[in-house]
Image (tube, rainbow, N blue to C red):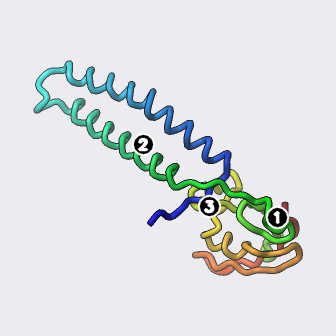
């Protein structure tokens, strides 16, 4: 059974670019490192060679994971989604009712989440609380530190 991963077009392009770079530049530099380590002599006592081979295994694992993710990726189509309700790829501006701070979040799939860029996962406590909300609505998000009360002040 294939479980699809819903991503934005932008994120799929980023992942494809990263995969291409890992397959070309990553593999090339890894082959050079292994060749250099091999030149140091006896492979049975060559720590550089062992480290390079281990790194090669990690590189191939990363390539494999990216390929698997991309094979299951589907582009999110928001054209049919309601504009007055928060959904995946909505940008939601909220006011924390506890400290009156304003936050702007874009709701994304777990694979795209990046808090530094304001992208929160729809499966996170805050993301789950915001899904389906409308402007003016108050919601609670149960987070590890307790409960946060928000008011939705804008939707894009």
Who's the residue at 43% across and 33% down the image? 23
Q: Residues within 10 Å of mark 2 (few under 14, many from 20)?
A: many
Quadrant assignment, res 16:
top right
Viewer-side residue, 54 vs 77: 77
Assign a secondary structure to mark 1: strand
3D distance between C-alphas at marks 2 and 3? 20 Å
Q: Which residue is mark 2?
A: 63
Q: Percent position (x, y) of residue 46?
A: 17, 30
Whether residue 83 is visible: yes
Whether residue 104 is visible: no
Q: Percent position (x, y) of residue 35?
A: 26, 22
Q: Earlier in the sequence, mark 1 or mark 2?
A: 2
144 left or right of 22 in image: right
Q: Percent position (x, y) of residue 24?
A: 45, 28
Question: Is residue 88 placed above or below 20 in the rendered structure?
Answer: below
36 left or right of 136 in image: left
Q: Which residue is mark 3?
A: 109
3D distance between C-alphas at marks 1 and 3? 18 Å
Q: If the image is split into quadrants, where does the N terminus sit?
A: bottom left
Viewer-side residue, 128 vs 15: 15
Who's the residue at 28% across and 40% down the image? 54
């Amino acid at each position: 059974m294939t479980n699809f991963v819903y991503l934005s077009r932008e994120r799929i392009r980023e992942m494809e670019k990263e995969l291409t770079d890992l397959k070309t530049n990553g593999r090339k530099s890894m082959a050079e490192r292994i060749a250099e380590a091999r030149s140091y002599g006896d492979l049975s006592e060559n720590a550089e060679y062992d480290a390079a081979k281990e790194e090669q295994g990690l590189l191939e694992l990363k390539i494999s994971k990216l390929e698997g993710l991309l094979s299951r990726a589907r582009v999110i189509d928001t054209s049919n989604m309601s504009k007055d309700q928060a959904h995946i790829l909505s940008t939601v501006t909220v006011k924390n009712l506890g400290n009156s701070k304003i936050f702007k979040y874009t709701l994304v799939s777990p694979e795209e989440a990046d808090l530094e860029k304001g992208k929160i996962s729809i499966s996170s406590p805050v993301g789950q609380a915001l899904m389906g909300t409308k402007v003016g609505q108050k919601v609670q998000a149960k987070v590890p530190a307790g409960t946060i009360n928000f008011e939705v002040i804008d939707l894009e």
